[in-house]
Image (cartoon, rainbow, N blue to C red):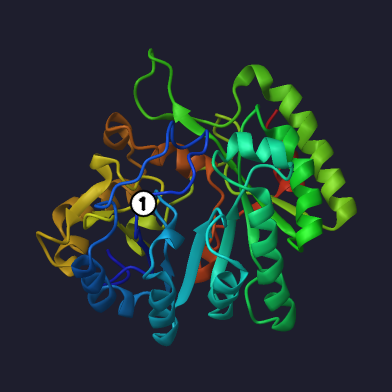
Amino acid sequence: MLDSLYPKYVFIELTKNCNLYCIMCREKKLYFDDWYMSDEILEKVMKTIVPHAEVVDLRGWGESSLDPRLPKLIDKISQLGKKTVLYTNLNTHNPSYWKNIIKKGTFLAISIESGNKENYKKIRRGGNLEVVKNNLKAIIEECDKNSTFPRPFFTTVISEKNVKEIKSLVDFGLEVGINEIELNPLSRPYHLNKPLGRWFGVLPEFEHETNCYLNDAYEYAKEKGISIKVAANLYHENSMKYKKCCHPWDYCCICTNGDVSFCDHLFHNTNAIMGNLNDDDFYTIWHNNKYEELRKMHDEGIYNQLTEKGLECQWCSKNRYGNLEYLIGNDSRAIDLKMYLKTREVKR
């Protein structure tokens, strides 16, 4: 049975455009004028979904700060008494822009994989770490003035290729005033003989080496007073018991074209689309047969059909600890890196 008539946590994908083309995301620069959510769809979302939500997360496949509507939109969401979340590469605008964003109480996550200028440029192609540093210092300055502002954290995609960069992130965090780093596994297509779903995390042949680097990084960060957390298993294995996902009941994602997806990890996967706001009102979509069937499969732990469609719900149920679910009162959340490493020791 559905606990809520509306979702508690709503994602609004303002744009699919990005100012960068990072190695784990895009092969080349992509920018299209029609890759922005229309005013009509955004108005529908603001009138019919946001008033019922507790958290509004302004992210999708692109960099939301490219949308000139963002500051005023955050103002409106704040006036409605909702929490606002924004993930950003922080390579846009100037310090005064970002000071204004944090003053609205926005939960900011900074997407970054290295604190070394040259390595950063190789990973975050088109990016400039100096811009990130200047913007971050301004943000942290405001947070230091007002302890009620949520302090930003680093969100980092990890693979065997960049795990050595964690120490440089610790140093960079210390320099700019960030005290938390959240690690997530790299997702990539399976090999050709395994066409369904995606491969998550470190490849098996690099497991021991990566473990050594993670242990070393944890001790280094501890000395510096910086916390490292893990949002999902960094290796492609089932690391915990089945956990019921709250997303089919509490989350929804509105894509730029009005598509309604049930999960922020599956924004543009056609099999995760429950309907479209150009065809139906949101309440109808939220309670339609497709959504109800999805909830039933999650409730009963039946993933066969979802796996066959290339949806990684089964992997998530046994490997994802959590992200910001705690903002809506759910106990799913990222765990301390040391605790994570201990769970892997016990498993073995």
> Please, which residue is most extreme toward the right here?
223
In this orientation, does residue 54 appear?
Answer: no
- The image shows residue 174 at horizontal and vertical percentages of 81, 57
Rendering quarter of residue 53:
bottom left
In this orientation, does residue 259 appear?
Answer: yes
| Left or right of 287 on screen, residue 11 | right
**Which residue is pictured at 59% across the width and 49% down the height?**
231
> Please, which residue is most extreme toward the top here?
193
Disc tally is 1
Residue 23 to residue 98: above or below: above
**Which residue is pictured at 68% across the width and 77% down the height?**
142
**Element on which disc 1 rests:** loop
What amino acid type should be assigned to the residue bearing mark 1? Cys
- The image shows residue 218 at horizontal and vertical percentages of 80, 44
- The image shows residue 160 at horizontal and vertical percentages of 65, 27
Rendering quarter of residue 75:
bottom left
Q: Which residue is mark 1?
A: 263
**Which residue is pictured at 28% across the width and 29% down the height?**
308
Q: Which corner quadrant holds the C terminus? A: top right
- The image shows residue 37 at horizontal and vertical percentages of 27, 60
**Which residue is pictured at 33% across the width and 68% down the height?**
7
| Left or right of 248 on screen, residue 109 | right
Rendering quarter of residue 311:
top left
Q: Residues within 10 Å of mark 1 (few under 14, many from 20)?
A: many
Residue 235 to residue 249: above or below: above
Is residue 343 or residue 65 the one in the foreground? 65
Q: Which corner quadrant holds the N terminus? A: bottom left
